[in-house]
Image: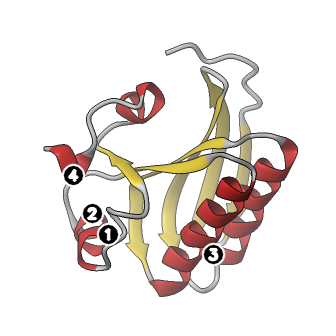
Amino acid sequence: MNVNGTTGQQQHHEDLSIHVHVIDDIEAFELTGSLDIATSPTVRAALTSASERGGHQLIVDLTQVDFLDSTGLGALIGGQRRAREFGGEVRIVAKEGQILRLLRITGLLKVFAVYPTLEDAVKNGQRVGDL
């Protein structure tokens, strides 16, 4: 993976930190903490802004997220909707566990391309649903 044009931006919002960097011309958002009613507006705004700036291929890494509620899912769906308006997509990285289970139960594995690792997401490789 080529980390180019790395901005290395870090945002903190109470129980969530967002580390943004560019890998092979794809903007990656690595989230740590809780994606919930308090933090989801920040995530939605970050994804919307990236899509509108021209970052049409986005990755949201949820492997360090310990809690995700319906408003967090809504922020991801809103980000996906905006990216698609600009001809792009949001790819999700999720490891086995509570977050991936939630994506399965809600049917969002059909809405998002979900990958087990950041590297798989960058390369558009093996998806979770394919395993």
In the image, residue 83 sits, relative to residue 131, either above or below, namely: below
Check contact, mark 3 vs mark 2: CB within 8 A.
no
Q: Secondary structure at mark 3?
A: helix
How far apart marks 3 and 1 lie (CA) works out to 16 Å
Instruction: Give the residue type at disc 2.
Output: Leu
The amino acid pointed to by label 3 is Ser
Q: CA distance from mark 2 to mark 4?
A: 10 Å
Are the residues flagged by discs 2 and 1 in contact, CB closer than 8 Å? yes
Secondary structure found at label 1: helix
C-alpha span from label 4 to label 3: 25 Å
Sequence-first disc among 3 and 2? 3
Please identify the quarter of the rendering in which residue 8 is found: top right
**Residue designated by label 3:** 40
Residue 74: x percent and y percent? 56, 79
Q: Is residue 104 visible?
A: yes
* Mark positioned earlier in the residue sequence (4 or 1): 1
Alpha carbon of mark 3 to alpha carbon of mark 2: how far? 18 Å
Q: Position of residue 24 (x, y in %)?
A: 60, 20
Q: Amino acid at mark 1?
A: Leu
Q: Which mark is residue 76?
A: none
- Relative placement, left or right, of 44 versus 128 is right
Residue type (three-letter) at the residue carrying disc 4? Gly
Residue at 61% in and 18% down:
3
In this view, the residue in front, 32 or 23, is 23
Q: Which residue is mark 1?
A: 103
- Pick whichever of labels 4 and 3 is earlier in the sequence: 3
Residue shown at 64%/83% (left/top)?
38
Residue matched to label 4: 129
Q: Is residue 13 above or below residue 95?
A: below
Q: Which residue is mark 2?
A: 100
> Which circle's residue, 3 or 1, is located before the other in the chain?
3
6 sits left or right of 61 in the view? right
